[in-house]
């Protein structure tokens, strides 16, 4: 592998997002964030899941076109999010749109593991039926290969591992965000997962989310295999410089004589396990592809939209029988 002696500056946006009938206001805010990020030297701007929309508001929304135009004007790449109509009435896909510096849509990733219907309705203005896509995606950009996920898909290690095997240098997992207090407190867990995915796959991980109602409990972060490069709890930009040459260095070494020798002055010190992404035993992993009786069936719509409730009951019944 040839070493890449360059870095890229990215800006992860954690906005104070508008929802419902006010969601249209996200478009102007998103364009202002692109301006701010570009002025700060960023080549890539990452927005949260469903931002600038539509997401919880009316489906008639020109936010995407406005963001594409601003990306073209400022010559930056952008990850934007929106809800799109599905193949059946009252169904949708949540998409992660990768826009290049000419304003062209380079990828339209449909979340393969959406939230479950109750949570979908809570987040998306009463829309229960967000259907899964069935294709994982990596996209080559001038600054590296981008792996696309959405929100809690980062908690599924198999998805990140597949993107790593496809050569991803960074995984971008824009998140949603809750509208008020709930019984979960996941900020620290989210950042632990981001660090874990970065370390075990030797790549960068970018996480951000919508902040609703003045929340100051965001989970935004940018993780490298060796350290957290940026994090933010409140609304605003997170700026991080991703060193692609350093990524090549940790990927192209094992614990060999060099790594196990005492460092001399000026020698590189590594804060991750070099070569980790190459230590694999695929012949032992067949169990991962076998059906799991209590797993949620994401394509419940094939049996009828009303069958989603049975998926919840199936999981409860299986748990009670253990």
Image (tube, rainbow, N blue to C red):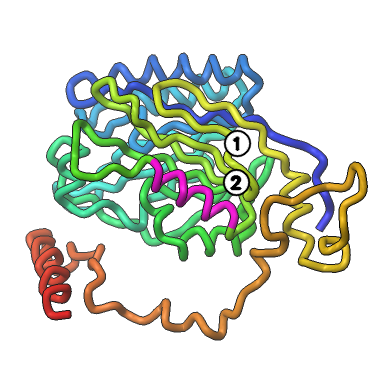
**Vertical order, 92 against 60 (above or below):** below
Q: Label 2 to label 1, Cα distance in Å?
A: 9 Å
Residue at position x 83%, y 68% in the image: 256
Q: Quadrant of residue 28?
A: top left
The answer to whether residue 103 shows anywhere in this view is: no
Q: Does the magenta stretch mainly form a helix, a strand or a loop? A: helix
Q: Residue 32 appears at what percent x and percent y?
A: 46, 14
Residue 112 belongs to magenta span: no
Displayed quadrant of residue 185: top left
Which residue does the numbered mark 2 point to in the structure image? 204
Residues marked 2 and 1 touching at CB (< 8 Å): yes
Image location of residue 273, percent across then percent down: 68, 60
Secondary element under disc 2, as helix, strand or loop, is strand
Q: On screen, 321 above or below 91?
A: below
Part of the protein shown in magenta:
188-199
Give the number of marks. 2
Q: Quadrant of residue 102?
A: top right
Q: Between 43 and 154, which is closer to the camera in this rendering?
A: 154
Position above or below: 292 against 227: below
Q: Please give the label number shown on residue 72.
A: none
Say which element carries label 1.
Answer: strand
Residue depicted at x 43% and y 53%: 154
**Foreground of the two, 3 or 98:** 3
Q: Which residue is mark 1?
A: 229
Is 74 left or right of 131, judged from the image as shown? right
Q: Position of residue 170 (x, y in %)?
A: 59, 47
């Amino acid at each position: 592998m040839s070493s890449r002696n360059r870095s890229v500056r990215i800006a992860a946006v954690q906005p104070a997002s508008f929802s419902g009938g006010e969601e249209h206001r996200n478009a102007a805010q998103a364009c202002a964030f692109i301006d701010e990020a570009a002025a700060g030297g960023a080549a890539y701007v990452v927005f949260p899941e469903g931002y600038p929309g539509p997401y919880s508001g009316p489906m008639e929304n020109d936010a995407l076109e406005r963001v594409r135009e601003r990306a073209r004007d400022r010559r930056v790449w952008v990850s934007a999010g929106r809800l799109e109509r599905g193949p059946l009435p009252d169904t949708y896909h949540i998409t992660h749109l990768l826009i290049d510096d000419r304003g062209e849509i380079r990828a339209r990733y449909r979340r393969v593991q959406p939230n479950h219907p109750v949570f979908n309705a809570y987040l998306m203005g009463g829309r229960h039926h967000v259907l899964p896509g069935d294709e994982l995606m990596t996209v080559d950009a001038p600054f590296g290969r981008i792996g696309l996920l959405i929100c809690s898909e980062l908690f599924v290690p198999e998805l990140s591992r597949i993107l790593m095997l496809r050569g991803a240098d960074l995984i971008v997992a824009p998140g949603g965000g809750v509208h008020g207090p709930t019984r979960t407190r996941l900020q620290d867990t989210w950042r632990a997962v981001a660090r874990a995915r970065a370390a075990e796959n030797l790549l960068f991980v970018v996480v951000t989310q919508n902040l609703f109602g003045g929340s100051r409990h965001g989970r935004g972060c940018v993780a490298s295999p060796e350290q957290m490069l940026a994090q933010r709890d409140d609304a605003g930009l997170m700026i991080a410089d991703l060193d692609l040459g350093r990524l090549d260095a940790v990927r192209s070494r094992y614990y060999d004589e060099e790594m196990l020798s005492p460092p001399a002055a000026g020698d590189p010190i590594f804060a991750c396990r070099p070569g980790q992404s190459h230590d694999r035993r695929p012949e032992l992993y067949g169990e991962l592809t076998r059906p799991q009786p209590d797993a949620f069936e994401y394509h419940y719509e094939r049996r009828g939209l009303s069958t989603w409730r049975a998926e919840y009951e199936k999981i409860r019944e299986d748990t009670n029988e253990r």
